[in-house]
Image: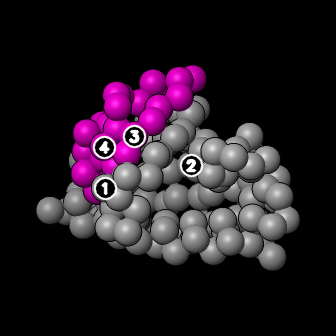
Amino acid sequence: MDERIEISIEISAPIDRVWRALTDFREFGQWFRVELEGPFVPGQPLSGIMVYPGQEGVRWHAVIKRIKPYQFIFCWPHGDGTSEADDVMTHVEFSLQSQNGGTRATVVETGFEDLPDALRHKAFEQNFEGWTVQIQNLKDYAEG
């Protein structure tokens, strides 16, 4: 199994608009559908509550690793609060490039190989599906 998710999309909006949608915690919360408890601060953990249909009330946790133009990186756990997977985090990296008057946004998630065997395939499948939806949400939000 390829243990790397990589999805790109063309967004008909200037790179600075997409960057703000990605890194302003209020705007990120709108398109990602999570109510975050504060801003993104490199080196700091951040939590929130999902409001995404079907995920309402689920706690969202991440540790912000880097925010620099035009790269945004965080790590997040895959456990349920009661398993060995709680200590394993995958690495999510967004990168933006100006392209044809718009922006090419790419999300890459790695680190699935560190998850327990019983969780690895399920986490990969769910996150692949999730990023396919979320990167489209970013596009729709930034273009709207």
Q: Quadrant of residue 36?
A: top left
What number is the disc on residue 72? none
Task: Please state if 37 lies on the left or on the right of 142 as rendered.
Answer: right
Query: Which quarter of the figure is the C terminus placed in?
Result: bottom left
Residue, disc 4: 35
Residue, disc 1: 51
Categorize mark 3 by other alpha carbons within 10 Å: few (<14), some (14-19), many (20+): some
What number is the disc on residue 93? 2
Residue, disc 3: 48
Mark 3: secondary structure:
strand
Mark 1: secondary structure:
loop
CB-based contact (under 8 Å), mark 1 and mark 3: no
Q: Real-space Cα distance between discs 1 and 4?
A: 7 Å
Mark 2: secondary structure:
strand
| Percent position of residue 105, x then y | 43, 59
Q: Real-space Cα distance between discs 2 and 4?
A: 20 Å
Task: Judge depth for marks 1 and 2 and give the one in front.
Answer: 1
Specify the segment rendered in magenta. 23-49
Residue at horizontal 56%, vertical 34%?
63
Task: Name which residue type carries label 2.
Answer: Glu
Answer with mark 1 or mark 2, whichever residue precedes in sequence. Answer: 1
Residues 88 and 1: in front is: 88
Is 35 a magenta residue? yes
